[in-house]
Image: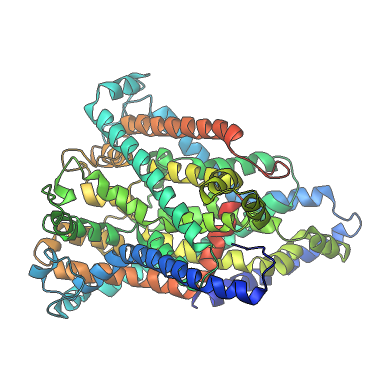
Amino acid sequence: MSASPSTTARPAAKGAGAPTAGGGRGSAKRRTPISRRGERLVGYTFMTPWIIGSLVFTVGPMLWSLYLSFTDYHLILGGDFIGLDNYRAMFDDPMFGRAVKVTLLYVLLAVPLKLIASLAVAMLLTQSRRGIGFYRAAFYMPSLIAMSVGIAIVWKALFAAGGPQDQFMSWFGWEGGGFIGNPSVSILMLVLLSVWTFGAPMVIFMAGLLQVPAELHEAAEVDGAGKWHRFVHITIPMLSPVIFFNVLMETVHAFQLFGPAFIIGGTAGGPAWSTLFYTVRIYALAFVDLRMGYASAWAWMLVLAVGVVTLIMFRAAKNLVYYAGEDNK
Amino acid sequence: MSVATEAPRVIARKRRTGADRAKSVAWHVALLAVLVVVLYPAFWVLTASVRETSDILTTISPIPTSITWENFASAFDGLAGIPLWRFFWNSFVIAALSVVGILASCSITAYALGRLEFPGRKAMFAVVIATLLLPGQVMLIPQYLIFAEMDVVNTIFPLVIGKFLGLDAFFVFMYVQFLRGIPRELDQAATIDGAGHFRIFFSIMLPLLRPAIVTSSIFTFIWSWNDFMGPLIYLHEIEKFPLPRLLQSYNNTEAVSNYGGMMAMTLLSLVPVVLFFLVFQKFLIKGIATSGVKG
């Protein structure tokens, strides 16, 4: 409730200043309706904050970090240009291999599991039955809190030695203890945290499923197609743009997991580097060790990796994604 | 499910009710099972917050055997002599400024990108899309150096300035998508009536953008409330900590001896987000469905 008054008050407050400017420009415009020059002027005026912001805080920093990645810059000691040495050093750095392994393992486990869960539940929720609104809201809720420090702390407790997960699994003969102390399974804590947020892609899947024409299913049913056939040959192709969107966004985000990994594993990615996520290592290099040049090289490797994965996905999408009717991007 | 038979409707419907009811029960059972798993962590923390510290880590059942309110008393005491409400206030200030910033900047940026024609518009929109996918970590270090040079480290300036400059690509994109759904005839009619672009923006677009504005405000509030990396890098004095930083510090120091206090504090930190969600859930879900699918 508190947000809506402020949202309406804000434009009104701004509007109070605007009419003078709008009126002045309006009179000039009356002579040549939709004048190109006026539009340009307004366009650039409206874009000014973004242009300044992008140059100072986005584009500028990107170029700067690219430069830093070729130096051995240290926050206190300074540094010099060292060419490609940082990139060479990475491949001899045991931490690099560990961080890549942990991050890739997480992406490969968390993204498919989360999306399969979200599609399955979305299909259940697009049948016309009572209680859908309630289920949808309840399933969506974790997505809003999962990345908070609070939930990371809860997760630590749930997977502690003797905690709920340990006790539950010991009923089935599990002797591995709490996930948090066991390096061979500790990554699963974060995978499960990600699966817990299946509600966000689920909502997107639901919107997509509702747009699949019912006639297609009916026609196929008349022709004797079973449920599985209809799923594979109608639902999946019709839903493929939405699937592509979800896979892309979830993958890009999974590569950048930070908060929960930091709280659960610390900057060392404990136990035994088993939760040493790539971004956690970048943070430790840059803001604990203060080796900002080397950390920049790590960050650029991440950009390259995400860029390559994104490109591969867009390539694959050309053949795999079906756009009904015209090519709507 | 539609059975096309010549049989009278009444009979067809009667015959279906038995099987339908069984299916309906199975449907609810499946979803309730998912619900139990999804809500377990929430219930667990809810009951952990009223348990004795010694009791918390060793119980799987979400029902407490004994109830104590001491955990909340120690949670309200905060950390290092600074009361809990202070950390709530710090979080609130950052979140509120972020909401105002997003509102002011994203609406005008999106109007220019989605409605106006000027050289460079397409390139700028491409930059917005690219930053949607770009890992933010790559800009982190230079940004820190810039803010250090500006002497604003250890203030909330670095946490909110990007919001005022429309650098949150997700929201700019969401507003652009939303603007595309508003008929162009409205602008044309207004232009014929002599309205300039400022007039069109403030009197026609902003009121019509209301759903997008509400959705973006809620998301901004929640994300900024949860944000950890920003405060971790930029805020170093405990008096300035928002809740995530408080929880992290508490977890590293007090929690060893006072686990109950930690759980109560955790629960309290989640309350505003959950309340926000319960009040605005329709807006949120609609927002994510529309802005997501059109990508």
Number of numbered discs overlaid on the protein picture: 0
> Which residue lies at the image location 55% right of the left edge and 49% below the top edge?
A226
Residue B19 visible somewhere in the drawing: yes
Farthest residue to the right: give it: A31
> Which residue lies at the image location 48% right of the left edge and 62% below the top edge?
B219
Rendered image quadrant of residue A293? top left
Rendered image quadrant of residue A159? bottom left
**Image quadrant occupied by the N terminus of chain B:** bottom right
Give coordinates of residue A127: x percent, y percent. Answer: 53, 64
Give coordinates of residue A19: x percent, y percent. Answer: 74, 68
Give coordinates of residue A179: x percent, y percent. Answer: 18, 49
Task: Tell which of A286 and B227 is nearer to you.
Answer: B227
Give coordinates of residue A283: x percent, y percent. Answer: 30, 41
Residue B78 visible somewhere in the drawing: no
Task: Tell which of A20 and A139 is nearer to you.
Answer: A139
Rendered image quadrant of residue A316? top right
Left or right relative to A189: residue B271? right
> Which residue lies at the image location 47% right of the left edge and 32% below the top edge?
A309
Farthest residue to the front: give it: B7
> Which residue lies at the image location 28% right of the left edge and 66% below the top edge?
B40
A126 vs B168: above or below: below
B78 vs B188: above or below: below
B47 vs B112: above or below: below
Identify the image's colour scheme: rainbow, by chain, secondary structure or one colour: rainbow
